[in-house]
Image (cartoon, rainbow, N blue to C red):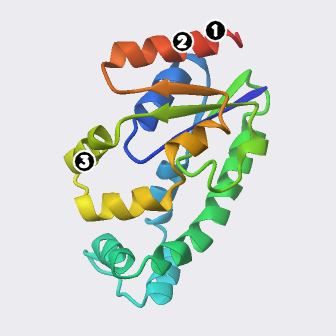
Amino acid sequence: MIKIGITGSLASGKTTASKFISGRNGPLFSADLNVKKLYTNKRFKKLIAKKLNITINSQFTNNIKKKILENKENLLRLEKIIHPLVRKKMIDFSKKNKNRKFLFFEIPLLIESKLIKYFDVVIFIKSKKNLRLKRYKLNGGSANLFSLLDKHQIKDTKKMKFCDYTVVNNSSFSVLKKQLLNIIKKYE
């Protein structure tokens, strides 16, 4: 089994790259998707509401974003709850799919969370900051939250040093696909 981690900065195209490369070669674990599932869990929501002193209502996720913007320590509080839960799901995913040739893991904070040791190959998806901001806003995000979350991550130049491959995603999907296919061919 070859475990391939896919990471990159906020709105760099990790999801697009991960879906493409895994769709052809093996199952995909998405940290973001697992976090979204957590937010549907009542016990989890109660824990977050208590930790951030907010109420559970239709504005729950917006209130979390406001709390993060008010005080970046709230982001660290959230991560202390979320990261161990997602890590457990990641380990369960690996066990469940242990007989597959390739396993793919889309993990935005792979470097920051010191998860490199879990992977045989790490691919970094890189994109220009102005393009990432544009993508983030197109998906309903705010410039303020983008700035805060982007500053929370390690700089691209530093992250790239920990990765086996860097894929630049500043142009078309076909260029992205070609780069990813060239990487995966080395392991087939």
C-beta proximity under 8 Å, tags 1 and 3: no
Q: Residue at x 28, y 38 (%)?
A: 131
Mark 2 vs 1: CB contact within 8 A: yes
Give the left or right position of residue 171, taking residue 46 as reference: left
Question: What is the spatial separation of the Cα atoms under label 3 and label 2, in whole angstroms?
Answer: 27 Å
- What's the amino acid at mark 1? Lys
For the question of whether residue 142 can be seen, the reply is: no
Of callouts 3 and 2, the N-terminal one:
3
Q: What residue is pinned by disc 1? A: 185
Vertical order, 83 against 140 (above or below): below
Q: Which mark is residue 181?
A: 2
Left or right of residue 166: residue 15: left
Residue 8 % position (x, y): 50, 41
Q: Which label was assigned to residue 139?
A: 3
Any mark on residue 34, and which?
none
Amino acid identity at mark 3: Asn
Q: Nearer the viewer, residue 74 or 45?
A: 74
Left or right, residue 55 beside residue 49:
left
Residue under the image location 54 percent in, 53 percent down: 154
Q: Find residue 92 and report its horizontal and vertical position in percent.
A: 72, 49
Is 37 situated left or right of 105 in this image? left
| Residue at x-position 59% and y-position 73% | 81
Q: CA distance from mark 2 to mark 1?
A: 6 Å
Identify the secondary structure beneath mark 1.
Answer: helix
Helix, strand or loop status at disc 3:
loop
Q: Position of residue 42 (x, y in %)?
A: 47, 75
**Cα distance, mark 1 to mark 3?**
32 Å
Vertical side of 105 occupied by 121: above or below:
above
